[in-house]
Image (cartoon, grey):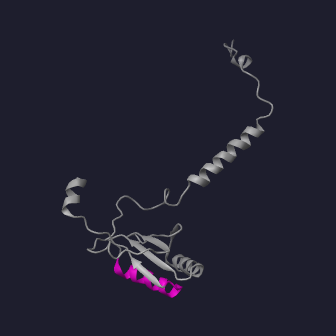
Amino acid sequence: MITRPLDLASRLRPEPRNFDFLFYVNAGLIALFFSLCGSRFVLAPGLGVDFQMPQMNGAAAGAAATDRFISVLPSGQIFADGLLNMSQLKDWLKVEAKKLRQPSLLVRASSEVPISQLTEIVSAARDAGFTRVIWGADEPLREESRIISR
């Protein structure tokens, strides 16, 4: 009975003797690629496409630059440098406030987040040492831009 009719193993080229160098070059290039192209802004976890900030007239006029920001979902999830619960957020706020001279915080909360949760977050930020805490809002779309976007 013939088990290997084509005898392909005899027709293969032998393995290269020194492929260790090429392996380390490839591993180094992959690590370099992920360190340069990996970003918390590109691969931000958890914020779905249905994340809608509240809309308010004059939001763009009142815009200000902040040092740190957090995102809050209606489910109670808080994203800073990863997913945090409220006690972890308090610790994170204390650490971040100590790094800066005049720390400021932007709270990007979905429009369905309860006010009680937002006030708890703002209170924790003030207790941690943040001098300025801003709730994020979007400017409502004008009629011309609604027609164009459809």
Tell me: 67 left or right of 139.
Answer: right
Could you tell me residue 70's position as x and y percent? 46, 72
Could you tell me residue 17's position as x and y percent? 80, 31
Classify the position of the N terminus by image quarter.
top right
Query: Considering only vertical position in the picture, is 50 above or below 66?
Result: above
Count every numbered label the image shows and give the total.
0
Towards the viewer: 116 or 19: 19
Q: Residue at x 76, y 28 (%)?
A: 15
List the single residue furthest toward the bottom.
127
Could you tell me residue 143's position as x and y percent? 19, 62
Towards the viewer: 76 or 141: 141
Give, as a single range, the part of the protein colored magenta.
114-130
Towards the viewer: 146 or 2: 146
Quadrant housing residue 39:
bottom right
Tell me: 146 left or right of 92.
Answer: left
Q: Residue at x 76, y 39 (%)?
A: 21
Does the magenta portion include 50?
Answer: no
Quadrant housing residue 141:
bottom left
Query: Considering only vertical position in the picture, is 26 above or below 37?
Result: above
Q: Residue at x 52, y 61 (%)?
A: 40
